[in-house]
Amino acid sequence: MVNMSFDQPRLSRADAKRMRLRSGLQGDTPVVAVGAHDAMSARLIGHYDFDAVWVSGFGVSAMAYGLPDLNLVTMTETLAVTRTIEGVTDLPVVVDCDNGFGGFSNVVRTAVEFDRAGVAAVCIEDNLFPKRNSLYQGQSKRDLIATKEQARRLKAAVEGKDSEAFVVIARVEALIAGHGVEAAIDRATAYADAGADAILIHSKDKTLTEITGFLDAWHSTGITTPLVAVPTLFPDYTADELHEKGFSMVILANQPMRAAVKAMEDTLEILEKERKPAAADPTIASVNHVFDLVLTTETIQAEEADEGA
């Protein structure tokens, strides 16, 4: 008699990475994500002990398009860069999708398209379109999308996704915008109720007083939705210290991008002064190292093996 039993189908590559992220958000140690702005930076992140890749909106705007982070880069342009990053890393990819690139329907389409692209998660914030980068110091208080409307957008984004494993992170800008802890709690609660899988709370307060006030109030609500931190503006706290305070995920958002800019400027200064390639060699990667990073030898060997078959 033929055995007609079958094993359960294996998870797709995308869903396996999504489930790894979901599991990490519930774990005993923080999920540490590092910002990538292109495929090479994503490859390099994967060579170190990190848990996820963050596709930084700031990084994509600045490095891929040479534009300020002011909603000048479109959803499809961000998606194009994201696809190259997703294709070269085994880590879960979390994408900074700003405010969903527009209104209600734009937010829903953003979630659907990035879900279909195979990334693990998207992060959608409550800044009005066009947005202002949270790191920009020139504006102390500004308006945000109304809480009820943002919750409606997030609910539709969650309901519109194809994969149950796909993660939607809701980013709360109330502290950045100067609206205070109470407003931040109201927004975070509404977004969790709308089905967001995690809440990213951001602040410019380097002392962490605002964040601590938010955490105390949040924990008293009894809501168990994981919290995410981006400590660019309070950089002296380690991922483990932030985890102890209640954050499940910590995003080191733009350090590789800033390192790349500094390294290129230093190299260009040397080349401008010395006018010969050898002057830069002591401080730059060798050509062979770059060949190795993009698997040049392995690719050639595969081609030759195919020719000899």
Image: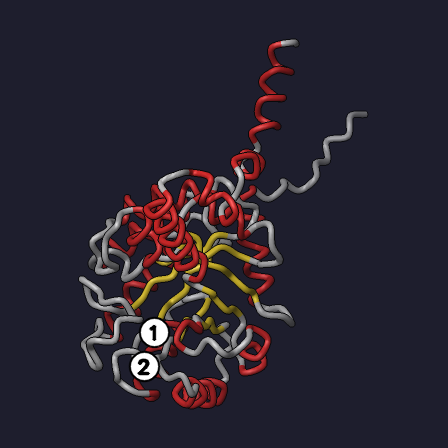
The three-letter amino acid code for the residue at tag 1 is Val
Q: Secondary structure at mark 1?
A: strand
Label 1 crowd bin: few (<14), some (14–19), many (20+), radius 10 Å: many
Count up the numbered dots: 2
Residue indicated by mark 2: 175
Q: Quadrant of the N terminus?
A: top right
- State whether residue 71 is above or below residue 195: above
Quadrant of res 183: bottom left
* 172 on left or right of 29: left
* Relative depth, front residue between 231 and 94: 231
* 100 on left or right of 225: left
Label 2 crowd bin: few (<14), some (14–19), many (20+), radius 10 Å: many
Instruction: Please identify, in this view, whether the residue under mark 2 or under mark 1 is nearer the observer.
Output: 2
Contact check, label 2 and label 1, Cβ < 8 Å: yes
Q: Secondary structure at mark 2?
A: loop
The three-letter amino acid code for the residue at tag 2 is Leu
Residue indicated by mark 1: 172
- State whether residue 304 is above or below residue 95: above
Query: Is there any visible trace of residue 164 in the rendered image?
Result: no
- State whether residue 288 is above or below residue 19: above
Q: Measuring from the top left, give residue 107's x and y in whole percent.
A: 28, 56
> Residue at image x 34%, y 74%?
172
| Residue lying farthest to the top in this orientation | 308
Q: Measuring from the top left, give residue 122's x and y in whole percent.
A: 40, 57
